[in-house]
Image (cartoon, rainbow, N blue to C red):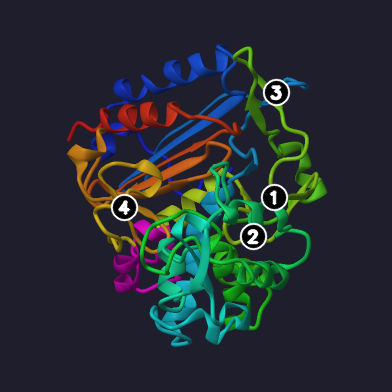
């Protein structure tokens, strides 16, 4: 199997094999206790793959073991890829970060905003821009269970019933939670970016990703659907049960069939650990991987610096800000874990996660399929950093 990087001994890149061996027993406990079906952990440093381990199952019912080429629903790990796609078009001169989205999407003209905790609807003070979407400061959300009319509107809307154009038209008819640029709220901003890739490039979103990102990087198993001949590699997805175990989810969120997902810029892709490592290495190397350049160095630097107020913590991550598609560590002490300033990362709904640490020339990826809490992420981060010995 082609992992995307040459294999090497940990000591060759300043890490301890003995200390890396601490990862497997910790992950094994989660599997043996029935909290997750299986897990892949992957660590690369200085352009060498020095840790890639598999534990447990990709399907509990059939007892099929997880494997290095298992395909996972990566959900919101789609967002960094979509963000790269839109920034590739930015580099080509199609728009500026402060360009209004309404110039490309008429449905976003004259947006409204909920005021007074949803009791009133007023005109937006400013237009939604590309940067608002990239930084999740647009006023778009995902919807939640707190009492507010915006949640009722999001529940009533069927964003994934048609195509991307139908989705953005529905979003344009719903008032924003707040004025663009006034707060950070995770939501459908990146899904709108996916449609903008289509509009700006004149190419279907999925085709753009394939031709401009996946094929150049050699990401052969990343797509919005899984081919029939690869279906035996597709992991099942699970959720916690009341008795502390897990159960399979028959119809995972955003799926449009047993092997396919809506072409959502924020959550639709399936991928492997090896494929996603290629994407991470491209970002680590300032836009270039294996001779293929997707972005310029200065663009990657802009994407991976903090763009939001210190008062806004992305999904309650202390010590973190947010760049153009990634969370960014701004204060290691406040983050309450091991790491480096400038480390950028994100994760997915089914407990997949990655981070890229330019200071240590380090990439780490964890893949599993559990829609629920994931304390093993923090453990994996500590277990990775404690193995650095140079």
Q: What distance separates the C-alpha of mark 2 from that of mark 3? A: 25 Å
In depth, the one of 11 and 293 nearer the eye is: 293
Place residue 73 in its image quadrant.
top right
Q: Nearer the viewer, residue 161 or 329?
A: 161
- Tell which tag, 3 or 4, sits nearer the viewer: 4
Tell me which numbered mark, 2 or 1, is placed earlier along the sequence.
1
The quadrant holding residue 103 is bottom right
Q: Is residue 167 above or below residue 321?
A: below
| Residue at the (63%, 12%) spot, across then down | 243
User: Which residue is the site of mark 2?
Assistant: 264
Snapshot quadrant of residue 159: bottom right
Element assignment for label 3: strand
Report which residue position mark 1 lands on.
254
Q: Residues within 10 Å of mark 2 (few under 14, many from 20)?
A: many
Q: CA distance from mark 4 to mark 2?
A: 25 Å
The foreground one among 184 and 266 is 184
- State the residue position of label 4: 312
- CA neighbours of label 1 inside 10 A, class few (<14), some (14 to 19), many (20+): some
Q: CA distance from mark 3 to mark 1?
A: 18 Å
Residue 233 vertical position relative to residue 153 in the rendered view, above or below: above
| Mark 4 and mark 1: Cα distance apart in space | 28 Å
Residue identified by numbered label 3? 247
First in sequence: mark 3 vs mark 1: 3
Q: In this picture, is 200 found above or below 290?
A: below
Spatial separation of the CA atoms under disc 3 and disc 4: 35 Å
Q: Mark 2 falls on what kind of element? A: loop
Query: Percent from the top left, x then y, of residue 355?
Result: 38, 45
Q: Residue at x 34, y 61 (%)?
A: 323
């Amino acid at each position: 199997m082609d992992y995307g990087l040459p294999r090497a001994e940990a000591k060759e890149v300043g890490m301890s094999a003995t200390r890396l061996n601490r990862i497997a027993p910790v992950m094994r406990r989660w599997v043996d206790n029935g909290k997750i079906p299986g897990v892949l952990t992957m660590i690369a440093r200085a352009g060498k793959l020095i840790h890639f381990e598999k534990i447990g199952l990709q399907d509990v019912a059939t007892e099929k073991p997880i494997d290095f080429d298992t395909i996972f629903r990566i959900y919101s790990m789609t967002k960094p890829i979509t963000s790269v796609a839109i920034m590739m078009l930015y580099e080509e001169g199609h728009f500026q970060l402060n360009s209004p989205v309404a110039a490309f999407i008429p449905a976003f003209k004259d947006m409204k905003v909920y005021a007074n905790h949803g009791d009133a609807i007023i005109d937006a003070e400013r237009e939604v821009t590309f940067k608002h979407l990239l930084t999740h400061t647009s006023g778009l959300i995902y919807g939640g269970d707190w009492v507010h009319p915006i949640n009722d509107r999001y529940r009533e809307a069927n964003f994934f019933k048609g195509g991307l154009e139908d989705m953005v038209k529905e979003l344009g008819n719903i008032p924003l939670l707040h004025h663009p640029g006034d707060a950070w709220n995770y939501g459908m901003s990146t899904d709108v970016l996916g449609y903008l890739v289509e509009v700006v490039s004149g190419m279907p979103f999925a085709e753009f990703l394939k031709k401009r990102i996946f094929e150049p990087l050699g990401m052969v198993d990343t797509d919005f659907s899984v081919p029939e001949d690869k279906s035996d590699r597709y992991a099942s997805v699970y959720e916690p049960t009341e008795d502390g175990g897990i159960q399979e989810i028959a119809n995972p969120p955003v799926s449009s069939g047993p092997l396919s997902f809506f072409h959502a810029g924020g959550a639709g892709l399936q991928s492997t650990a090896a494929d996603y490592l290629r994407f991470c290495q491209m970002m680590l190397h300032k836009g270039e991987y294996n001779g293929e350049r997707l972005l310029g160095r200065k663009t990657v630097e802009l994407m991976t610096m903090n763009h939001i107020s210190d008062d806004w913590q992305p999904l309650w991550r202390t010590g973190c800000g947010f760049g153009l598609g990634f969370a960014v560590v701004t204060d290691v002490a406040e983050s309450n874990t091991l790491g480096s300033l400038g480390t950028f990362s994100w994760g997915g709904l089914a407990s997949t996660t990655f981070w890229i640490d330019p200071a240590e020339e380090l990439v780490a990826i964890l893949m599993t399929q559990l829609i629920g809490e994931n304390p093993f992420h923090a453990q994996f981060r500590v277990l990775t950093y404690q193995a650095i010995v140079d």
